[in-house]
Amino acid sequence: MGETARTTKLLLDLSDRAQGGANHAKRQALSETVQILDMARRFYLAFFLAHPDKLTERVQVISKTTGEVREALISADHLLTWAEAVTVETRAHPDPLPDWNFSRAFPDFPNRYRRSVIKDCIGKARGYLSQMKTWQASGKKKGRPGTPSAANLPTLYAGTFSLELDGLDLRQSFVRLKVYHERAWTWLNYPTRYNRYFEARRTEPGWEQKSPKLVLSKQGAAIHFLQTKEIKAKKIVESKQDPDLVTVAVDLNVKFPAVITVRQHGRIIQTRFVSDQGLDQHRFKHLKRVSRKQWQSGKAVKGERANQRLWQHIKRHNLDSAHKTARTIVEVCEQYPGCVLVFERLRKITPKGGSTSRRTNRKQANQLRGKINQLAKEKAYTQGIVSCETNPHGTSQYCSRCGKMGMRFMSRHGQRIPSRGGKLFFCSNCQYECHADWNASVNIHRSFYHEMHWQPRPKKSG
Ligand SMILES: [Zn+2]
């Protein structure tokens, strides 16, 4: 049993009004809201840090099921009630603490926002206090934990936001947000870039909605919707007992970002090559340009960014490619429910030799492998598929058929030219010839089932 989470972004349309977006005042209102919430958070953070005893108070708790009374740390809900009682003016509590009068400092603050702020601060203050405690206990002089910052993304609880979906025409939909504008709290409507992909994710069964967050950046504004899902999956150790177990092995590479093989009963039953669609070449072209410009303009200026657009483009391409490849891997896994996804443990590779652009390109390609690995695992887990990593020892050097050492080669005029980066693999023991990446992918299965020169590890004496 486990839980997985994901976020879906809903972009707010803050473009010019003529094109149907919101005006500048609305954008201004959002940043003002973020500012005032940060200020409120600063207030409560200072408040809680001034009352550390209350945060760590032990209270009597009565168990609802057994009726047992035991001592436990005060819960966040009780702290919230206490904090509101001593800082907020109400009919029941007419005079809060004179130094900590929230109602006077922040008049008309919506109580939903106030509660989200208080909850946030309880977590931050408690984390800080416990870090402080361990640091003091360690007796070290360095590494004193810094005071927590008050800035955070505003959480939108019910009552501060509503999503208005205008019938079938999804483009007409907008979000109503409670914002702080011109020293007053008001409701404002923001047009959204609502689309059918968002709708499909929002309404997908099995996912539970959590409170969304408002994320404001330089480029635009978005609401991030958090969803969680319960996952039921067997442990790998249990799955290994099953004689009909299907394993899906993935070899991550450059030209073929993923070579997927599926094995059951000791036989390969499916193979899939995922091509990079020329991404490597394309990236190299751009990186050559970057390094040439760098060379022409001399030493880089510290604190200044160069070629920003180009780097953005490269990053976007990489991420998109990683998502698509990971998706393909999961699509293969979905055909075999209860299968196990196997990767080889990625090595740390430092590119050497070649031009600067070539080394940077290798570096990017290695990072892409890591990204594909991570995304595929996450995407597979939401489908209840567990993944694991195997020892990468010799996966590309040994023959997947007989297990003897073979060689990688290039084919030139019908002749085998040995080369480390060769596309093909040849085994001189059994005369077997195949695609090198495919051979590695099959070897990952062998490594998973401990069929490849696997010996029990000698017990360390002493
Ligand atoms: Zn062989």
Image (cartoon, rainbow, N blue to C red):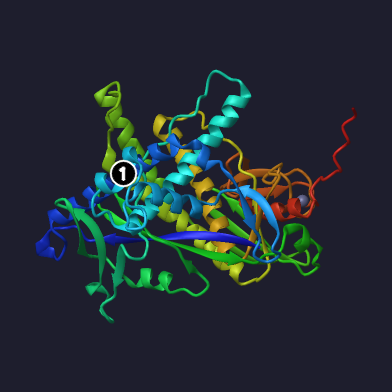
Taking the view exactly as shown, the residue that stands out farthest to the left is: 18
Query: Is 415 left or right of 23, judged from the image as shown?
Result: right
Which residue is tagged 1? 101
Which quadrant of the figure has residue 409? top right
Q: Who's the residue at 50% across and 53% down the image?
A: 78
Q: Who's the residue at 37% across and 61% down the image?
A: 157
- List x then y, in percent, for residue 240: 78, 61
Query: Is 72 left or right of 141, judged from the image as shown?
Result: right
Give the vertical position of 275 relative to 120 (above or below): below
- List x then y, in percent, for residue 310: 29, 42
Amino acid at pointer 1? Asn
Q: Secondary structure at mark 1?
A: loop
Taking the view exactly as shown, the residue that stands out farthest to the bottom is: 168
- List x then y, in percent, for residue 126: 51, 41
Give the vertical position of 10 relative to 360 (above or below): below
- List x then y, in percent, for residue 441: 65, 54
Within 10 Å of disc 1 (Cα), the crowding (few <14, some 14-19, many 20+) is some
Q: Is residue 5 visible?
A: yes
* Nearer-the-camera pick, 248 or 189: 189
* Nearer-the-camera pick, 47 or 36: 47
* Nearer-the-camera pick, 260 or 345: 345
Q: Who's the residue at 66% across and 63% down the image?
A: 1
Numbered circles on residues, count: 1
Respond yes or no on whether mark 1 lies under 8 Å from ligand 1.
Answer: no
* Nearer-the-camera pick, 98 or 129: 98
Q: Is residue 431 visible?
A: no
Query: Is 429 left or right of 258, judged from the image as shown?
Result: right
Query: Is 272 left or right of 41, judged from the image as shown?
Result: right
Give the vertical position of 215 relative to 295 (above or below): below
Which quadrant of the figure has residue 61? bottom right
Q: Please identify the quadrant where the C terminus is shown.
A: top right
